[in-house]
Image: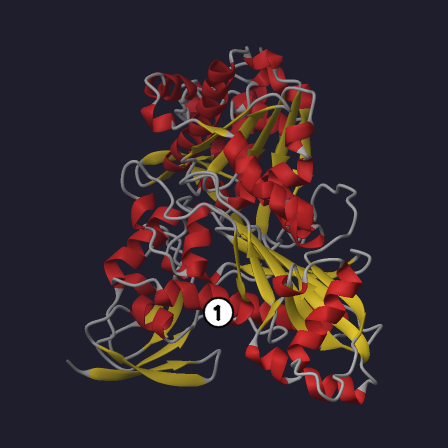
Amino acid sequence: MAEHIITLTKERRNFQAADTETLLAALIRAQAAPDAPCGGRGTCGKCLVKVRSKKYNGVQKACQIYVDCDMEVDTSLKATGHSLLTEGIERDIPVMPMIQRTAIKMERCKVGESYSEWELLKMALERATGRKAEEFTASPAVISGVYAFMEAHDYEGEAVLCKNRVLALAEPGKRLYLAAFDIGTTSVVGYLLDGAGGKELCVTSRLNPQSQFGADVIARSDYVLKAGSGDEMSRVIRGALDEMLGELAEKGGIGRTDIWQVAIVGNTCMNHLFLNISPDSLVHAPYNPASRESILLKASEVQLFIHPEGQVLMLPNIAGFVGADTVGCLLASDFDHRDKMSLMIDIGTNGEMVLGNKDRMITCSTAAGPAFEGAKIECGMRGALGAVDHIHMEEGRVVYSTIGGGEAVGICGSGLMDVVAMLLNEGFLEDTGRLMDPDELENEYARANKDRIIKIGGKNAFSITEKVYISQKDIGEVQQAKAAIAAGVILLCGKMGIPVSGIEDVMIAGAFGNYMKAESACRIGLIPQELAGKIRMIGNAAGEGAKIAVLNEAEYDRCDGLIRQVEFLELAADPDFNDTYLDELMFLTDEE
């Protein structure tokens, strides 16, 4: 085994790599965070880098070349300036977090008494709270500091409590701060909150660095199982959250140690990978989580550096592919108190959905795939600068917009949905999804744009710009994604015993759902057309649920009850799923 020097020109550093590993594997090991949504199988074309060496010169797929010589590598081809959703539906709640400040006055030990300082503190807490003294606990570090703190403050101060655990003694008036995170498969969003009034002080977001191991949860689970350990996958996401906590503290003008508690939501796989719990059970029948209960642990246990006694609240999971992010959405929408028959869908790599109201709730997850996240699409990209985000035809002219308003360099999920809807509306597509030949076009506007039908790999494609197109393969990816979600909606209705038209309110959560056009979603059949007038976007409801959980202890405690109320429908085991899915692969060819 020989080793070679890789020089990262953008980062201005170098490292050694063995000739037995691919350049992608070497970049991952060097924490260069390459983009590889296909998990290094060479199918997505997103891990492009510029290479200069005696063997390679130019743009290469990092996953397809081995480090068999010294190399200069430019990683700047990776998309930047991502548009990430941070806002969501809001619900008024009383601000009563698990972390509380309690004023205490501690009596000094009298001569002849044998009380310890810790016993005297517990007595003071009993007088202040009405709870029994023996119920209180504290770490040795906190107990060690009781005497010095009380001597310095004339035996008065405040105890910072988490339930019955004393986390610290503090001077009166010092504010407590809280944080909440939504760990999505594609992106991570963090919020800093005032623990007294509940005000959101600032937000930060970034792409999930685990994407370098694959775009979807299956690819990442496979990576962990093949590696024999989740250490690396866990390290990168914990590191990202810790960096984001630093960003939040800096933006909020506070110290890291002023943050006392962090609530985290994410799908079941993201939950397991963050906690370094093996995803083995998630990828083998019957696809159950290793753990689904809520978890309270010290922040330092997961390498999040806030207050030394700071804590992390992990919201519970519902099932193998319906996670704490869905629980967050249920909290944010107050779903279990709703009178209307409601459908909530979080459209992403996994399409989680819940149907019901206060009387009954049923959930399922559909393997929609990462098409609407830009993966597996030939010109696909995430929502970043230069992505075509919306497109339509206006009097025979193709009109599109890009994120940032500049030149189109690719197409993201909302643009992908729009272009398929446009192709259907203008007669470019058959109901099977076949993109028609130029001489088959009958619609006037379609014929006027027949030159946009080009050949890619011997098959028809539709050209949006000289550089950006949608291929026949891409249309197939959209069909599979939309069929999976539509089948889920139909089967949930069957399980509930109602027609699709019986749904009164449709809430679309998540980043992709927030930017998509509802009419395009219904036109391609992602959402049944009879629901077109009932759709509303609720943004990052999962993140909002995480905020609610950290701001109100009762709402957090409510989560474990919620997961027991929701019925889970395993679509793969439903005898009607395959037929329903195959039916939904077809497009409607008119607006009826």
Identify the residue at image location x=68%, y=57%: 98
Q: Is residue 182 above or below residue 515?
A: below
Whether residue 211 is visible here, answered yes or no, is no
Q: Nearer the viewer, residue 13 or 448?
A: 13
Q: Nearer the viewer, residue 291 or 397?
A: 291
Where residue 542 sits, quadrant-wise, is top right
Identify the residue at image location x=51%, y=16%: 496
Q: Nearer the viewer, residue 469 or 516?
A: 516
Colouring method of the image: secondary structure
Q: Nearer the viewer, residue 396 or 427?
A: 427
Where residue 344 sits, quadrant-wise, is top right
Whole-percent x, y for residue 470 in the image:
45, 39
- Residue farthest to the left, as pictured: 1
Quadrant in the picture for the C terminus: top right
Where residue 116 sits, quadrant-wise, is bottom right
Q: Report the number of discs.
A: 1
Q: Is residue 72 above or below residue 230?
A: below
Q: Is residue 508 above or below residue 307?
A: above
Whether residue 470 is visible here, answered yes or no, is yes
473 relative position to 514: left or right = left
- Residue farthest to the front, as pictured: 112
**Amino acid residing under circle 1:** Glu
Whole-percent x, y for residue 497 in the image:
51, 11
469 relative position to 253: left or right = left
Q: Residues within 10 Å of mark 1 (few under 14, many from 20)?
A: few
Whole-percent x, y for residue 175 in the image:
79, 69
Which residue has dot 1 on it?
A: 301
Quadrant in the picture for the N terminus: bottom left
